[in-house]
Image (spheres, rainbow, N blue to C red):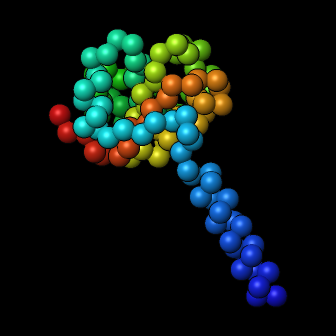
């Protein structure tokens, strides 16, 4: 019986890791790498934090598009331009990247560490 429990646990752990693992189509960048991209007009910058978090502190080039509203607001984004996604820590933005990928976007980048790692 213990052996079956270990197998179930191992399968659950593997499933969890696979769900959290970034997709091959989603790039990861640091906030330092982000700084060199901010002036690029061929990129779209979205901040998936809540309006309150965004209002408190945000990067000027980023448009606020909260994660929970992303599935119904993605039509305002172009599939022809890269999308750079940020949040507070990098977790919600990673989820947003997966949502965008499922919607057919192919050039998506997550900012690792999010606003917690940002320094002007």
Q: Residue at x 30, y 31 (%)?
A: 34
Seen from this angle, which residue lies furthest front? 24
Residue 5 falls left or right of residue 21: right
Residue 44 falls left or right of residue 37: right
Q: Position of residue 13 (x, y in %)?
A: 64, 66
> Is residue 112 depicted above or below 39 in this figure?
below
Q: Residue at x 64, y 23 (%)?
A: 104
Residue 33, quarter of the rendered image:
top left
Q: Residue at x 30, y 24 (%)?
A: 37
Seen from this angle, which residue lies furthest left? 120
Q: Quick one: 103 or 56, which is closer to the camera?
A: 103
Number of marks present in the image shown: 0
Residue 28 appears in view: yes
Residue 52 appears in view: no
Q: Residue at x 51, y 36 (%)?
A: 26
Q: Position of residue 11 (x, y in %)?
A: 71, 67
In the rendered image, the quadrant that contains the C terminus is: top left
Residue 17, quarter of the rendered image:
bottom right
> Is residue 112 depicted above or below 79 in this figure?
below
Residue 41, quarter of the rendered image:
top left
Q: Quick one: 57 or 118, which is closer to the camera?
A: 118
In the rendered image, the quadrant that contains the N terminus is: bottom right
Q: Position of residue 47 (x, y in %)?
A: 41, 30
Q: Quick one: 91 or 53, which is closer to the camera?
A: 91
Q: Position of residue 5 (x, y in %)?
A: 75, 80
Seen from this angle, which residue lies furthest bottom? 2
């Amino acid at each position: 019986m213990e052996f079956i429990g270990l197998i179930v646990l191992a399968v659950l752990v593997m499933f969890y890791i696979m769900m959290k693992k970034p997709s091959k189509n989603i790039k990861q960048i640091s906030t330092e790498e982000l700084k060199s991209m901010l002036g690029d007009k061929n990129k779209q910058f979205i901040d998936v934090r809540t309006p309150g978090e965004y209002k408190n502190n945000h990067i000027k080039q980023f448009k606020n598009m909260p994660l929970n509203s992303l599935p119904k607001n993605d039509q305002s984004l172009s599939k022809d331009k890269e999308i750079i996604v940020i949040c507070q820590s990098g977790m919600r933005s990673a989820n947003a990247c997966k949502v965008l990928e499922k919607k057919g976007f192919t050039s998506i980048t997550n900012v690792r560490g999010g606003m917690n790692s940002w320094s002007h």
